[in-house]
Image (spheres, rainbow, N blue to C red):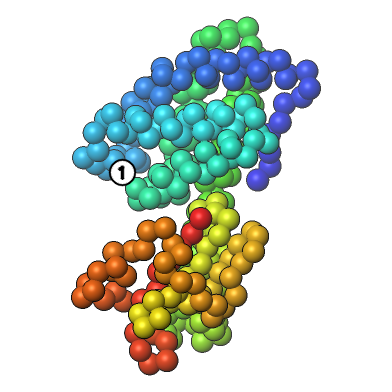
Amino acid sequence: MVERTLSASSSAEYKKIIEVLKANAGRIIENWAHESSRSAFLKGADLNVPEEVRIERLRVFYQALVAKADNPTSKIAQEMLRSAIRAEHARSSSLSGMVKKQNLLRDTMLYVVEHDLPDLPRATAKMALDAIIDRGIEATAETMEEYGEMRGALSRSLPGMDETFSLDQALARFCRSAMDYFDSDFVALFRYNPDMRDLVCLACSAKGLALTKDSSVMLESFPAPPMWARRPGSPRRRGISSGGSRSRTPYARR
């Protein structure tokens, strides 16, 4: 994606635009929600969702996007934006739907900026807002790509799905992709051993110290063991087969 940037002489104008976006957040979000509800392309995406819930979701995304625009190098702002994108994706929003919403947001922001900064050249305002939306769309595309890689790696772990991919490779790839998608420092898959009451690592990906395959971790070392591990006689969950016996495989991330 080609990044749109303003010249150094436009930095003062850019700061004014950010100030206007912050000062008019409520007005912009309300208009954005209204335009989104009118869009034929987006109709049905938020069916039966109360208006206040929709507006709150847009507010979270908008605040994250403006925070990223105000401080592009901020890791906190980046995490806020990706978290908002994942939240939208978790509600079954498609890539095309999320991009369409952001394009509607650009139009809404442009209208407010032109109203509050009448002396600002339209080309400057449009370029600044295009750059802000570009960051949102780029983050959305990256997040969706990571999600696709995560699902693809998990699919390859199923018997007969991809003979060129070993189970160990597929699970390791899944952990790496999940760590990227969730912005986590640690992701691991474990097999629960009911006899020893410990967890055997099947795959792990971490930014720091990682667990090696087949290493064991005592279940009691986790602060809150899952209910199925603490209650005798609870229904068994499907897991990854190992050595001919079915064993449960919890998924952990930090």
- State the residue at coordinates (52%, 44%): 82
Nearer the observer, 171 or 153: 171
In which quadrant of the rendered view does residue 240 lie?
A: bottom left
Mark 1 surroundings: few (<14), some (14-19) or many (≥20) residues within 10 A: some
**In the rendering, at what x and y percent does residue 90 appear?**
38, 50
For residue 146, side relative to residue 96 (left or right): right
Q: Can the viewer see residue 103?
A: no
Q: At label 1, which amino acid type do we have? A: Ala
Residue ID at (35%, 41%): 41
Comparing 180 with 248, the one in front is 248
56 over 213 or under it: above or below: above
Against 238, is 99 above or below? Answer: above
Say which quadrant the N terminus sits in. Answer: top right
How far across and how far down the image is residue 173, in percent? 56, 70
Q: Quadrant of residue 58?
A: top left
Quadrant position of residue 199: bottom left
In the displayed structure, does residue 162 sit left or right of residue 52? right
Q: Between residues 10 and 39, which one lies in front from this camera angle?
A: 10
Which residue lies most toward the front here? Answer: 220
Task: Judge whether 168 appears above or below 30 on screen.
Answer: below
161 sits left or right of 213 in the view: left
Residue 204: x and y, percent? 56, 69
Check disc 1 and report the residue beneath it. 45
Check disc 1 and report its element: helix, strand or loop.
loop
Residue at 61% from the left image edge and 30% from the top image edge: 69
